[in-house]
Image (cartoon, rainbow, N blue to C red):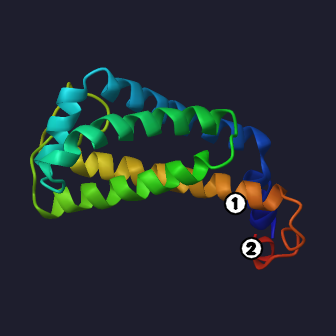
Amino acid sequence: MHIMIFMKRIVSSTWLNLFARFIIGGVFIYSGIAKLMDLQSFANAISQYDLLPQSLLAPVAIGLPSLEFLAGVGLIFNIRGSLSAIFTMLLLFVFVLWYGILRDLNIDCGCFSPEEIADHNSLKRAFYRDVVMIGAVLFIYLHRYLRSDHPMSHRSSIINLL
């Protein structure tokens, strides 16, 4: 019983929610800026996965980091839609990294900058890092749901589980 009360307090913590938003938002801002500062290297990293036709490399190399930056800023300032954008990007990143792991690619994941060390475990490290960030995003979603004025938010089965 005490564990359930403790878990409910953690999920309802405004400070923990702010911390998660600032960390995830900061990671996306940093990642977007790092990629935008060296678009050619990022386009090369994308091409190594061999998932996109050559004609889409430039638009994706410009668009994805721009979206990362904007979504990161949006998450920090709690702008509607930014959390969903980040969640969608993280799901995309996890599937692309999983694909690279399955193909046993020994490449730079393209996550932050071209200076990253590409070894056999870099894709796995990036995969696990993104899975942890998905967990943080799900925490933020749960926090929002529990703090909302939704009529079922205080009596939902989620609350009863906690």
Q: Which corner quadrant of the image does residue 1 belong to?
A: bottom right
Q: Is residue 127 above or below residue 27?
A: below
Along the polypeptide, which appears first: circle 2 or circle 1?
Answer: 1
What is the secondary structure assignment of the residue under circle 1? Answer: helix
The three-letter amino acid code for the residue at tag 1 is Leu
**Dot 1 alpha-carbon crowd within 10 angstroms: few under 14, some 14 to 19, many 20 or more:** some
**Residue 127, horizontal then vertical, whole percent:** 32, 52
Residue 160, how many percent across, how many down? 80, 76
Q: Quadrant of the C terminus?
A: bottom right
Note whether 48 is above or below 41 in the view shown.
Answer: below
Name the residue rendered at 20%, 36% in the picture. Answer: 43
Nearest to the observer: residue 146 or residue 87: 87
Residue 9: image x %, image y %?
Answer: 80, 54
Name the foreground residue: 44 vs 23: 44
Mark 2 falls on what kind of element? helix
On the question of residue 116 being in view, the answer is: no
Quarter-of-image position of residue 71: top right
Question: In this view of the protein, can residue 21 be seen by the observer?
Answer: yes
The residue depicted at 18 percent of the width and 58 percent of the height is: 101
| Residue 142: numbered disc | 1
Q: Position of residue 104 (x, y in %)?
A: 10, 57
**Which residue extends farthest bottom?**
157
Q: Residues within 10 Å of mark 2 (few under 14, many from 20)?
A: some
**For residue 116, above or below residue 145:** above
Residue kind at label 2, given as amino acid type: Ile
Kindly identify which numbered label has been placed on residue 129.
none
Q: Is residue 119 left or right of residue 86?
A: left
Contact between marks 2 and 1 (CB within 8 A): the answer is: yes
